[in-house]
């Protein structure tokens, strides 16, 4: 095919694609906050939530982050928010992974105390974005009552977006979510013997 | 089951999980930068890359971001980096999606000019993290020569991590990547008629 023909073919194909993209954009006209579930066993659930934090901060929106499980080990996102963006509401459960503590009653008490922070944010319409990092484990382990969580998520302010991360999470949260992205682990450096990396994995 | 029995059972199961997690951690002892490919059709590829940017900035590492395709429309991450973190090296191709331009030669020239920025970062060992956002499309559309890209990625400094995002990308980049996460779109608010959201989607 001549270069000229190639260019013409490309143009025609791109025109078609543009029509289809434009039509979808025109059809999506409801404006409101979302429930986004980032799940699966692959890398990038929490990172993705923090990318949205960055976006919202770019526009000057108020952001709240509640980290379940995480917090026993220092992370880059923790340092970044605490040192450089103290305007973000930030709370960590801070008890480490539950397989480190091995204490079910202690975990439940910590989960409840952490949930209280989440609940406060979910009632405050000044927050544009609320991240509930690793919250699905609280449901999976039955540390928190599912019904109560789902109700609080659904009754949040209309303009507020809430991002929930973590593997699993169950049918209930999938059903009420507007967007569900499942991150599949196709290959992981960790399995090839490479250590978790500062600034990348934590 | 009594509460006491439940707690004991939980403890035993968590102990087992801890052993398995500890063993994997001990086995992963190589320390070096990674090639990470974030692909698939779901929400969160670029967001996840920006979450890693946040992590690296937390530790005070140098970060470079090159955005292919994006840049014609203003985004939260662009405002955030330009206004609040000018220490990040940031370059955008800025020609909009290729189905908007419908000009193959112009796209190729823009892709080459953008790649020059990526190449510079991939040769500079002062950068801990380099994000090549939406770069897979340059390969899919054959705007850039695959062999040259793969060689540059592989010859980058040993301690540098590079994150490539975008749908597809082909076998070549999957093969050289250390970590590949595929983000699957299980549900998307967009399809239910909800408009893309500021601070969340862009």
Image (tube, coloured by chain):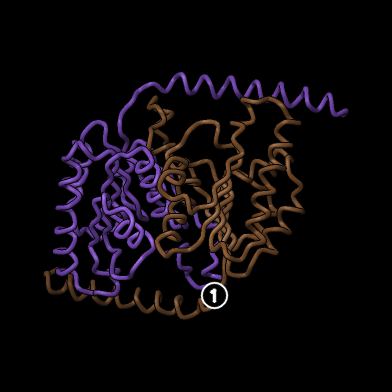
Chain colours: A purple, B brown
Residue at 37% across, 55% down:
A167
Tell me which residue sits at (42%, 39%) in the image: B76
Instruction: Say how many tags the image has.
Output: 1
Q: Residue at x 35, y 41 (%)?
A: A56
Percent of width and height locating residue B16 = 34, 77
Is residue A155 left or right of B111 when viewed as pictured? left
Q: Position of residue B71 (x, y in %)?
A: 55, 36
Residue highlighted by disc 1: B31
Q: Where A9 sits versus B157, above or below?
A: above
- Whether residue B166 is visible to the viewer of this picture, yes or no, is no
Location of the C terminus of chain A by quadrant is bottom left
> Most extreme residue toward the right, as rendered?
A2
The N terminus of chain A sits in image quarter: top right
Q: Quadrant of residue A35?
A: top left
| Residue drawn at x 58%, y 41% as measured from the top left | B92
A58 sits left or right of B119 in the view: left
Tell which subunit mark 1 falls on.
Answer: B
Give the image quarter of residue B158: bottom right
Q: Residues within 10 Å of mark 1 (few under 14, many from 20)?
A: few
**Vertical side of B87 occupied by A127: above or below:** above
Question: Taking the image as drawn, is residue B10 in sight?
Answer: yes
The answer to whether residue B198 is left or right of residue B10 is right
Q: Quadrant of residue A129?
A: top left
Name the residue nearer the viewer: B5 or A25. A25
Foreground: B18 or B158?
B158
Depth check: B102 or A165 in front? B102
Residue B172 place in picture, x, y as percent: 70, 54
Would you say B17 lies left or right of B87 here?
A: left
Position above or below: A2 against A122: above
Q: What SS does tag 1 mark?
A: loop
From the viewer's perspective, is residue A73 above or below residue B98?
below
In the image, residue A116 lies at what x, y percent? 14, 53
């Amino acid at each position: 095919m001549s270069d000229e023909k190639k260019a013409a073919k490309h143009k025609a194909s791109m025109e078609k694609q543009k029509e289809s993209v434009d039509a979808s954009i025109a059809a999506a006209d409801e404006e409101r906050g979302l429930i986004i579930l980032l799940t699966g066993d692959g890398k990038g659930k929490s990172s993705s939530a923090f990318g949205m934090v960055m976006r919202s901060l770019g526009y000057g929106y108020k952001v709240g982050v509640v980290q379940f499980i995480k917090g026993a080990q220092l992370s880059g996102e923790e340092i970044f928010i605490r040192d450089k963006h103290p305007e973000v509401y930030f709370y960590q459960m801070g008890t480490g992974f539950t397989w480190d503590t091995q204490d079910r009653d202690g975990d439940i008490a910590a989960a409840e105390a952490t949930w209280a922070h989440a609940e406060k944010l979910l009632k405050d319409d000044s927050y544009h974005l609320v991240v509930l990092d690793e919250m699905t484990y609280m449901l999976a382990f039955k540390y928190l009552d599912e019904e109560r969580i789902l109700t609080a998520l659904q009754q949040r302010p209309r303009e507020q977006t809430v991002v929930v991360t973590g593997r699993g999470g169950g049918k209930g949260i999938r059903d009420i979510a507007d967007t569900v992205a499942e991150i599949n682990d196709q290959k992981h450096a960790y399995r090839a013997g490479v250590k978790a990396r500062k600034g990348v994995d934590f």
